[in-house]
Image (cartoon, rainbow, N blue to C red):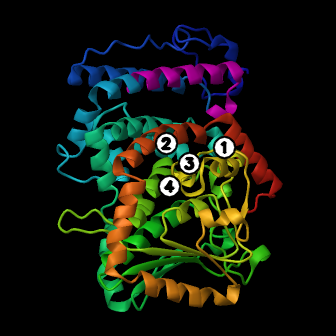
Amino acid sequence: MNTDAHPRTRPAAGTAAGTGADIGTYADLGLAPEPSLTGDLAGDAAALAEYAAAADRSLAALPPRPERDGPQQAAAEKVLAAARRLRATFLDRHVEAVYGRLTGDRTHHVRLPELMRAAGEQWPGLVPTEAQLDAERKHIQAHKEGREIDQGLFLRAVLRNPAAGAHLTDAMRTPSRRALDLLADFTATGRAALESVLVERRGPAAHLTVHNEHCLNAEDDTLIADMETAVDLALLDDRVRVGVLRGGVMSHPKYAGRRVFSAGINLRHLHEGRISFVGFLMQRELGYISKIQRGLHRPDRAGAGKPWVAAVDAFAIGGGMQLLLVFDRVIAERDAFFALPAAQEGIVPGAGNLRLSRCAGSRQARRVILWGDRIAAGDPGAAAVCDQIVAPEEMDTAIEEAVSALDNPAVVANRAMLTLAEEPPELFRTYMAEFAYVQATRLYSRDVIGKVDRAWSRAGGRP
């Protein structure tokens, strides 16, 4: 690559202007070896901030990622890896103190977006700043630097720590500010129309209907935020004793006029770089799905959660199938199917790996997750994820019967004990610690980006 053709490119410290082949080692980029940390928090934090700033200057000496040649990209990856090693070492020594500073020694529940912003401000170089993330959002996934991986490093360390991790999982089950703002109107009217979810109170049940019609109810950042608000409203309203989730009627040409439960992650948004690690992938698992499973965390009052019914029309793919694993009653129409195409997409299917083995057994979990097997509602194996099969015209009646059966105080107490026995909080915390880093790295792996780009091309750029 001729640097004269790229006015933003400048030689790194200690190199002569020329081709990308000149840039290939730490010395060429002017990046010193990683410093040794001493164990002193203030001193180590200063060393990390200085080293991270130097790494950023080295990256800035290179062309933007889409314009780099092979040696330049290899050099960038070496710089990023060196900075991440230092961050991991710093967190191994200081994560409990770092988290304590961010949460008033765990006296304040700080949810993920706010926690990340505070970490970027209070601990320079530890996680990406808002400005760095905003710059990343301007690019498609393949052209990003991958700064969200540093968020995954941070969350892995926090969740690995028993005290900090337990506090964070509790914080993520506190009611969202948006739901608290909408609660008075919802309790008065029994209705909340969010951008992609409609919440309606009918008798003892809150019916959540997903309306991401143009993309077959595929999950995106907006839907995740709307789902958390909707689940919060259902859990906060004392007149609601059962939750029901169902997909709305589609406008997508292939399924126009039919209900669909979920098509999983929105691959168009993933290709375009619009699936966020914190706002989507982590907030989804630690937020509304955990609230469905365990209820809200409210220090001012006890709460054991509420029972939930899922009504599956057409299919539950990817994240849609994952959701079913925390519901108390799953009803599917007779032609529906279930799938977790993790191997095809290349990312980890949330907590599906943790829960599907328990529900379906190890062998079937591997066939579904590793081999991409689909489960049809009529298959014998469907009992692992589905309780009742009905004709489409019988779905409404089946939902009403399920709500009536679950509207029982004994159900609330027993489902809480079942959850505790099946998935203790510590098991979930330790799983999510490893998930945080693995999923962040998978988002930026070459094979995932290649698969997403190929799928996007085959679909002709459609949702």
How far apart marks 1 and 2 lie (CA) works out to 14 Å
Q: Earlier in the sequence, mark 3 or mark 1?
A: 1
Q: Which of marks 2 and 3 is nearer the N terminus?
A: 3
Q: In this picture, is 250 found above or below 98?
A: below
Q: Tell me which secondary structure the magenta stretch mostly adopts.
A: helix
Q: Mark 2 points at which residue?
A: 435
Q: Earlier in the sequence, mark 1 or mark 2?
A: 1
Element at label 2: helix
**Disc 4 marks which amino acid?**
Phe
**Disc 2 marks which amino acid?**
Phe
How far apart marks 3 and 4 lie (CA) works out to 18 Å
Element at label 1: loop
Q: Give the range drawn in magenta.
A: 65-87
How far apart marks 1 and 4 lie (CA) works out to 17 Å
How far apart marks 3 and 1 lie (CA) works out to 14 Å
How far apart marks 2 and 3 lie (CA) works out to 10 Å
Residue 60 point in image, percent of width and height: 52, 27
Residue 107 point in image, percent of width and height: 17, 50
Q: Are marks 1 and 2 in contact (CB under 8 Å)?
A: no
